[in-house]
Amino acid sequence: MGSLNHILDEQKMPANDAVIRVQGLTKSFGSVSVLKGIDLNIHRSEVVCIIGPSGSGKSTFLRSLAFLDPYNDGEVRVEGELLGYRLIHGQRKLQTPTELAHARRNLGMVFQHFNLWPHMSAQQNVELALKYTRKIGANAAASEATAALTKVGLGEKRQLYPAQLSGGQQQRVAIARALAMKPKVMLFDEPTSALDPELVGEVLTVMQDLAREGMTMVIVTHEMGFAAKMADAVVFMDAGVIVEKGKPDDLFSKPKSPRLQEFLDTWRSRAF
């Protein structure tokens, strides 16, 4: 096997304005087909919100973008580099852990659940990722962790432990941990679904600030108001396919597909 750089050079495609390019993406769990040929380009500084009913494949698609759920066919390219697989003499093979970590370096991900270490402070949770993933020293990790926590409004609470923080604050720690890795794209999987309604706003405010700063974001969400206000594009998924994609004003007010109209009617009946 050649060097890592040589292998990665073979994966690169000509540059375009798509930070993430997805083509023909499929994913099955056993005999169950969950993603059925997804095509999607995500451009620099774009905020893309993915909506749809439960079981539509939204979260599986997002996890496939980070190769947390390895996809079966098709491809995901981040900054032109193939993610999850490597091409050697035309043959596709799984990337080694080192190659996969390199391919993921531009991605940050925030999950529904916070996944914080309970025996570590907020500061230590962020520092740990910096030390072991970015391999930076203790002093630099402490400085960058403090800056990331301050950015999400938790600078004064950085020495508190997860049990001493509200759910919204814990999710903001998780966002700070991802931001400290200096990603070019942030992936959010239902980041407010585990929160009490009164805590949702503080997390969405942080995400709105990131959007205004130009962070590229892909967000699986059930927060329709947020999607309508902050998204550059909204993607509606159902049964493992993209049914419709468009600007929020068009998609929410003038849906083209009966399935999207049905979904929006159901949402509105529950919201009011």
Image (cartoon, rainbow, N blue to C red):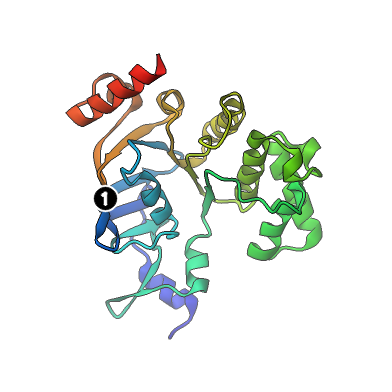
> Residue 215 vs residue 77: left or right?
right
Q: Is residue 257 visible?
A: no
Q: Quadrant of the C terminus?
A: top left
Q: Position of residue 201 (x, y in %)?
A: 58, 26
| In front of the other: 264 or 103 | 264
Residue 92, image quadrant: bottom left
Under mark 1, the amino acid is Ile
Q: Position of residue 223 (x, y in %)?
A: 45, 28
In the image, residue 132 above or below residue 241 = below
> Residue 255 vs residue 14: left or right?
left
In the image, residue 182 above or below residue 133 = above
Q: Position of residue 95 (x, y in %)?
A: 42, 72
Q: In the orientation shown, which residue stands out farthest toward the top?
A: 272
Q: Considering the numbered disc 1 on the image, is that residue within a helix, a strand or a loop?
A: strand
| In front of the other: 189 or 248 | 189
User: Which residue is at 45% across, 56% downward?
Assistant: 66
Q: Quadrant of the N terminus?
A: bottom left
| In front of the other: 31 or 110 | 31
User: Which residue is at 50% across, 72% downward?
Assistant: 97
In the image, residue 160 above or below residue 268 = below
Q: Which residue is mark 1?
A: 38
Total numbered labels placed on residues in the image? 1
Q: Position of residue 51 (x, y in %)?
A: 36, 35
User: Which residue is at 21% across, 31% downward?
Assistant: 259
Residues packed near mark 1 inside 10 Å, few (<14), some (14 to 19) or many (20 plus):
some
Q: Is residue 215 visible?
A: yes
